[in-house]
Image (cartoon, rainbow, N blue to C red):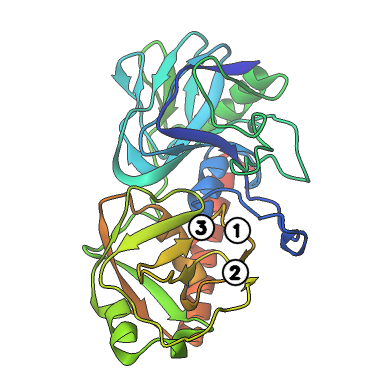
Amino acid sequence: MTLRVLRAGVLASVQDLGRAGMQHLAIVPGGAMDRVSHVVANALVGNEGDEATLEIALAGPQLAFERDVLVALHGARFEPQLDDAPMPIARPVLVRAGAKLRVGRAADGAFGYLAAAGGIDVAPVLHSRSTYLPGAFGGLDGRAVAAGSRLPLVAGVAKLSASRYERLRRGGRTRPLGAAAASVRWSAPMLTLPATDPIVVRVVDGVHADAFDAAARAALVDAPWRVLPESNRMGYRLAGPALASTLRRDIVSQSVGLGTVQVPPAGQPIVLMADRQTTGGYPRIAEVISADVALLAQVPPGRSLRFERVSLDHADAAREALARRVRDLTERLRWEYHE
């Protein structure tokens, strides 16, 4: 039982929440770029948060359904077409066997997550189903999906999907979407799409913040930064004023984390993302707070952002507030399935 890929998009790969606890062995955690939307997409189809989804960047693939499957697309605001009719996003949709889904381009944001009832059933590698593209392991043999790829689904996915949709139907708020699908009359909110223009990403000072002169530290938060097309799952490269470091010697490589803002000699920052390296030798001027990493992931190439410097207490409070929002939303979605 599979989803068949008829046409590949810009970049689509199987992802879950990653390989935690192995960075000391030089194995990057990886996983979904926008963990929040990944978790919500899973909850929309009745899954636990760590089931594997299809992460879709910028423009998505075309898929053929070989069985009835309950799916949900959440994250970036795509405008998918199901057999040439609009398919709603941020809702569970029961797609009938034989239907074809064209995800298309993102109208807002960068990464979307297509969840299926039971999850995408690839074999775990080092306790995770996520694809690590630089290392060529995990997911579909360590590679992005391509035309002709088949995304394996759990055994009995049609029966599981029918059972879960029946629970939704008992709530009395479902509706048909033509012959190809059926859905519900409600939707889940988008939690990570930028709500401000310019987009504001909060940071705390990095371990080497004092190694930059006052003008560079001011420019970090005062200047607009544009996300460059060379950005990828390893890091977002930013264009703006050159940030001058006062360091006069090389830095011994140190461990880096998700959201670390490194500054290479040319002075243009790189924000490390899901597939980052485990150590780095460039000075670290700042760290994106954990509550804003998913927001940053949704900034597409060509769009601009600004950084806002905050305190550690502010960062802690923001992390807890986001965790509460995600927890409250997923609990409400579980209630829709009467679980």
Left or right, residue 326 beside residue 102: right
- Give me the C-alpha separation between circle 3 and circle 2: 10 Å
The image shows residue 99 at horizontal and vertical percentages of 45, 12
Q: Is residue 32 above or below residue 227?
A: above
Which residue is denoted by mark 2 in the rendering?
256
The one nearer the camera, 287 or 180, is: 287
Helix or strand or loop: what does disc 2 sit on?
A: loop
- Give me the C-alpha separation between circle 2 and circle 1: 8 Å
Which residue is denoted by mark 3 in the rendering?
273
Determine contact: label 3, label 2, CB under 8 Å.
no
**Which mark is nearer the camera, 1 or 3?**
1
Residue type at mark 3 is Met
- Circle 1 packing at 10 Å, graded few (<14), some (14-19), many (20+), is many
- Identify the residue shown where x is 51% and y is 72%: 282
The one nearer the camera, 218 or 292, is: 218
Which residue is denoted by mark 1 in the rendering?
277
Left or right, residue 20 beside residue 33: right
